[in-house]
Image (cartoon, rainbow, N blue to C red):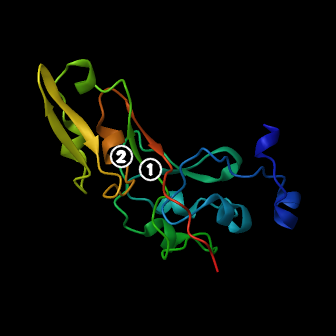
């Protein structure tokens, strides 16, 4: 818990809000640093999301819940925000999908739901002898939208952050 507490300046001191959790998935075009500096926790981004995947989490910080739906990159969360939290000049998400060991195909069960759901075509299936085709993720094509996460019946897909954050000038 103490690792989540950071100096947030006057706003953090006066509101008593903890720093955004580092492991939470943030709305597209936002990062923990901009949330800590500018987010007021008003919830306008969550109300504007037509996919209902943006919600206010601990400390009233917006976060993404990919368990029911994916991000369509409509930009309504960014448009609704009255503060300078969103930067559409950076990549929408700093993460890509990661397919875990609980994947049905890896356990011998035919399943290609993640590949069927991926709008970017980042998940392909490699044939193998003696079992169903295995999913393979092309990280350079993955947009981080979460379509595969919402669809996976084995809950074996998560996100990881291999994308380097751009330097802000």
Residue 147 location (% of width, % of height): 32, 47
Residue 53's tag is: 1
Residue depicted at x 37% and y 25%: 101
Quarter-of-image position of residue 84: bottom right
Which residue is denoted by mark 2 in the rendering?
69
- Residue 47 vs residue 136, the one in the foreground: 136
Figure quadrant of the C terminus: bottom right
Q: Residues within 10 Å of mark 1 (few under 14, many from 20)?
A: many
- Residue 44 vs residue 120, the one in the foreground: 120
Residue 70's tag is: none
Q: The residue tagged with tag 1: helix, strand or loop?
A: loop
Residue depicted at x 76% and y 45%: 4
Residue depicted at x 34% and y 54%: 142
Q: Is residue 17 left or right of residue 115?
A: right
Residue 140 location (% of width, % of height): 34, 58
Q: The residue tagged with tag 2: helix, strand or loop?
A: loop
The reply to whether the C-beta atoms of the residues labelled 1 and 2 are less than 8 Å apart is yes
Q: Is residue 39 left or right of residue 4?
A: left
Residue 70 location (% of width, % of height): 35, 50
């Amino acid at each position: 818990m103490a690792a989540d507490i950071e100096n947030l300046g006057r706003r953090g001191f006066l509101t008593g809000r903890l720093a955004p959790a580092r492991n939470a998935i943030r709305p597209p075009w936002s990062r923990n640093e901009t949330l800590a500096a500018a987010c007021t926790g008003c919830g306008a981004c969550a109300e504007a999301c037509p996919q209902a995947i943006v919600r206010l989490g601990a400390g009233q910080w917006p976060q993404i819940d990919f368990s029911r739906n994916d991000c369509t990159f409509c930009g309504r969360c960014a448009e609704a925000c009255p503060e300078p939290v969103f930067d559409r000049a950076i990549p929408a998400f700093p993460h890509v999908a990661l397919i875990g060991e609980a994947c049905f195909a890896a356990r011998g069960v035919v399943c290609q739901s993640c590949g069927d759901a991926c709008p970017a075509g980042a998940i392909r299936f490699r044939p193998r002898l003696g079992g169903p085709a295995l999913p393979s993720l092309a990280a350079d094509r993955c947009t981080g939208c979460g379509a595969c996460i919402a669809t996976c019946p084995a809950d074996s897909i998560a996100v990881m952050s291999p994308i380097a954050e751009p330097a802000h000038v």
